[in-house]
Image (cartoon, rainbow, N blue to C red):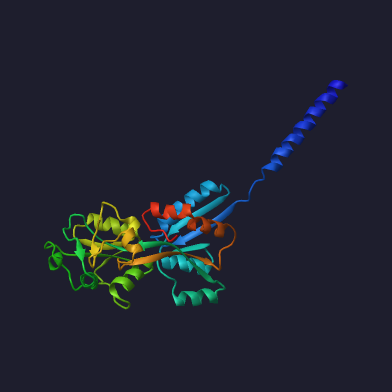
Amino acid sequence: MKRVILVALVIVFAGVLFAGCKSSQPTEQPVNITINGSTTVFPIAQKEAEVYMNKHLNVNISVEGTGSGNGIAALIDGTTDIADSSREIKQGEIDKAKANGVNPYEIPIALDALSVVVNPQNPVNALTTEQVKKIYVGEITNWKDVGGPDVPIVVVARDTSSGTYEAFIELALGKGVNITDKAIVQASNQTVKNTVALTKGAIGYIGLGYVDSSVKAISYDGVLPSKETAKNKTYKLSRYLYMYTNGQPTGAVKDFIDFVLSSEGQNIVDSVGFIKVK
């Protein structure tokens, strides 16, 4: 009889011990966050999400780079939690959002130097505002006209849903100016870079974080794109990069954006080639 009681006590004690261990380590509820938008912001958001998820195992963050306009449209439609954008939201988008019960809230998360790039074999190292404008509207069509070789210029541009496209129009060409219809239109920074890297006479524009040895960034009005020239505002094609939420962020979305703006998060911005805002 004693033996049976002893066994029973052991079983009860083990059950109490197990219950105690379980209650001291509650399982957190899974959380999903969706991010959609700018291909310029994409490498920042992707790396931030990767590091954040490693620290918060219950959080799953999906990141898509579909263009700033598409990201903002997704926020307005309620199909994304965070819209990445390489331009400020337009008044028309704000009006549409409010009509849909959405209140876009703007969060600057990085600074960028929008870089004019050419093929590395191109000896041209500098262009002026006027030269870039004439190239992109189709008035200058050969590199020999700007001090280069007798090679046709292949204009590479972004699609109209791109915040980078809008920023380039506003900063380099002027509002209302149209890019030549002979331009090769690409859907992302990466495809612009790849096209310029593989095309001897090409010229394009990409975010600073995408610039590498496969292309050559040239000076614009005598100033090269860099973190320093963007910070001191001597580089004329500098711009902010944004995340937009529906109203001030709350819950897990707020915690993630707080991380992006923290010292660690801003160091990630720096590590992927862009410029800290904090």
Q: With 8 as the anchor, is 89 left or right in this view?
A: left
Between 260 and 192, the one nearer to me in the picture: 260
Residue at coordinates 82% horizontally, 28% vertically from top-left?
A: 8
Residue 269 drawn at (x, y percent): 41, 55
Q: Which residue lies furthest to the right in this view?
A: 1
Q: Give the quarter of the figure containing the C terminus.
A: bottom left
Would you say 195 lies left or right of 245 here?
left
Q: Residue visible at 38% across and 60% down?
A: 40
Asked whether 19 or 240 is in front, the reply is 240
In the picture, measured across the screen, residue 174 lies left or right of residue 254, that is: left
Q: State which quadrant residue 70 falls in.
A: bottom left
Which of the image's four quarters has the N terminus?
Answer: top right
- Residue 143 x/y as whole percent: 15, 65
Q: Which residue is drawn at 40% across and 68% down?
A: 87
The location of residue 50, given as percent across then percent down, is: 47, 49
Query: Which residue is pictured at 66% across the width and 43% down the height?
Result: 25
- x and y percentages locating residue 133 in the rendered image: 24, 72
The residue furthest front is 232
Q: Is residue 147 above or below residue 170?
A: above
**Does the rendering let one see residue 186?**
no
Asked whether residue 11 is in view, the answer is: yes
Query: For this view, does 166 lie left or right of residue 64?
Result: left
Picture mark count: 0
Rendered image quadrant of residue 88: bottom left
